[in-house]
Image: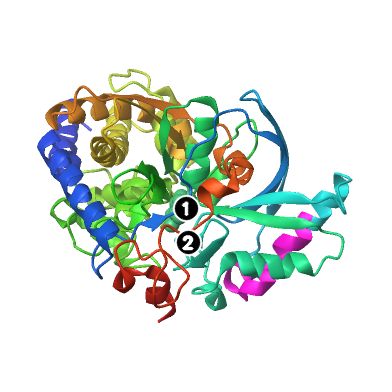
Amino acid sequence: MHWKSQENELALVKQATDCLILTDQQLCAISDSLSHEISAALAGPVDNSLHVYPTFISQVPDGCERGKYLALDLGGTNFRVLLIHLKGNRHSSVLNETYSISQELMQGHGQELFDYIALCLFNFVRAQGLLGQRLLLGFTFSFPCTQTSLRQAVLTKWTKGFSCADTVGQEIGQMLNRAIGKHQHLQIEVAAIVNDTTGTLISCAYQETDCRMGVIVGMCEQQRLCLNNDTGYFLGTGVNICYMETTCFDKQMIVNTELGAFGSGNKCLDFMRTEWDLRLDRHSINTGHQLFEKMVSGMYLGELVRLVVTDLVHRGILDSKVFALFSEPNCFITSYISQVEQDPEDSVTWENTRALLHSLGVLSPSAIDCKCLHLICTRISRRSAHLTSAVISSLLRRMSRARTVIGVDGSVYRCHPHYKTVMKDKISQLLQRLHCGHLEFRLMLSQDGSGRGAALVSALPLSEQSGPVSKCSRCREYDGLSGELDCRVCAVTA
Ligand code: BGC
C-alpha cells in the first residue's frame, strides 16, 4: 500500500475509535453515578440498582495475628487449598496446592462440587500430617453472596461460567460443612467466608495499616495458562471492589460492592457503550448483566479488540488479508494486548506486535498494520483502566480518609505493562476534579491476597466481627441495614 493511503488508514482507525476515549468530565459523571448507586444500595436495594453486600468484617488485622490456618480459594476453574502460618510480625508463610474444577462440576450439582472441594481439603490436610488437628478455615468464595454473618453466606447468583443450579439461594458455609462432615478425621471449622476483594484488602492491611480498599481486575482462566508467574496461579476472572464503609452501620464494615454489575440495572453507563460493547454483550452467556465487567475485565478485553478489528475490516478501513484471522470469536486473548503494548507507540521496529502477528500466522504485517493494532489495543485497555480509576476515585471520595492504601490484584493489573501507571495518574487527576485532591492514596499489589486474606479473617477476634449489625424482625437472622423490608435474607429466600 502507498504510504499516503497507509497514513489515511491510521487516521481512519483513530477517528473510528475516538468513541473509546472517555473525557475526565465523563469519568467524573461515572464517579457520581456510582456514589448514588452505592448510597441507594446501602439504604436498601431496589430492583434496578447495584446490590452491595456487607461482609461482617469490621476491623483489619494489626499484624500481630499468629497461628496456623487453612484457607480455600474458589473463584474460577481452579481452586486452591492453603495452609497459612501467621508469624505475628506482619510476616506469614504459605503452603498451597491447586486443583482443577471440571466443566461437569462447574455445571452439575452443588453438593457434588462441595464434596469434591472437601475431598481435596482432606487429601491436603493428610499430606501435611494434620489429620485430627482442630484448625480454623477461611473460605474465599468469589461470587455474589448475601452474608448473614461472617460464616454464613447465601449465594445470590453464579458468575464466571459456574451454574450449579441447586446452589443459588443456599447457604455456602452449610454446604461446605456438610461435605467436610463426611470425612471423619477432618476437624475443621469454617470460621469465615470472604470474597476475593475482601481477601485482598485484608491481606494488604496485614502489611499496611492504612489499607481500606480491595480491587480485582482479573482475566479469564484459559488466558492464565498463556502466562507465567511465580505461583503459576492467577487471581480472579472478573472485576470487583470492596471498601470499608463507615457511615451506614453502627460500626464500620467492609462492603462488597459486586461492582461488575454496575450499570446493568439503571443503564447509567449506556451513554458510553459502543456498538462493539453491545455486540459482545449480545453474544455473551449473560446478556444484560455484568456490563461494567464487560468493559473492564480481562475476560472480555481481547474479544473487544477483535470486534473492533473485524468491524474496521468490514468497513474497508483495515486490510482484510492481514486481519483475516480475527474473524474467529475469542481468538485474540487479553494477554495479546499486553504483548502488543510492550512496543512503544512510536516504535519503528514493532518487535512485539510483529512477533505476535507472526505467531498468529500473519507473515508480513506492515508498520502501519502494527500501529493500527497497537492503537486499538491501547484505546481498549486505557478505557478499562480509566473506568477502574473512576470507580476507585468515587469510593475514595466516599471514604474521605486522608490516606488510603488500595490493595489490588488480578492478572490485567499485574501483567499489562501500563495499566498501573495509567490508573495512578488518572485517579490523581479525577480526585482533583472531584475537589478531593487532598486525599492521598497508594496502589499496592497484593501478594496472594485471596488465600492469605481468608486465613487472616479467621484469625481476627471473633467478638469484633461475627455478629449481625441488627436483627431482622421477620427472619430474626440478619441485619436489615435499615429495617425489616430491606433485609436481604428475606429478599433472597422469599
Ligand atoms: C464476582 C465477584 C468477584 C470478581 C473477581 C465477579 O464476577 O461476581 O464476586 O469478586 O468476579 O473475581
Residue 449 appears left or right of 280: right
Q: Residue at x 87, y 54 (%)?
A: 132
372 vs 253: above or below: above
4 vs 321: above or below: above
Amino acid marked by disc 1: Phe
Q: In which quarter of the image is the N terminus?
A: top left
Residue 297 appears left or right of 345: right
Please name whichever residue, 74 or 55, is drawn nearer the observer in this view of the structure: 55
Image quadrant where residue 184 sits: bottom right
Q: Do the residues labelled 1 and 2 touch (CB within 8 Å)?
A: yes
What is the magenta segment's predominant secondary structure?
helix
Amino acid marked by disc 2: Gln
Please name whichever residue, 314 or 202, is drawn nearer the observer in this view of the structure: 202
Q: Which region is colored magenta?
A: 103-121
Image quadrant where residue 150 sits: bottom right
Can you tell which mark lies on residue 105? none
Residue 288 image point, x, y percent = 29, 66
Which residue lies under the disc numbered 2? 147
Q: Does the magenta stretch include residue 243?
A: no
Q: Say few, some or many: other residues with alpha carbon within 10 Å of mark 2 (under 14 / 14 to 19 / 20 or more).
A: many
Can you tell which mark lies on residue 56? 1
Residue 430 appears left or right of 462: left
Q: Quadrant of the C terminus?
A: bottom left
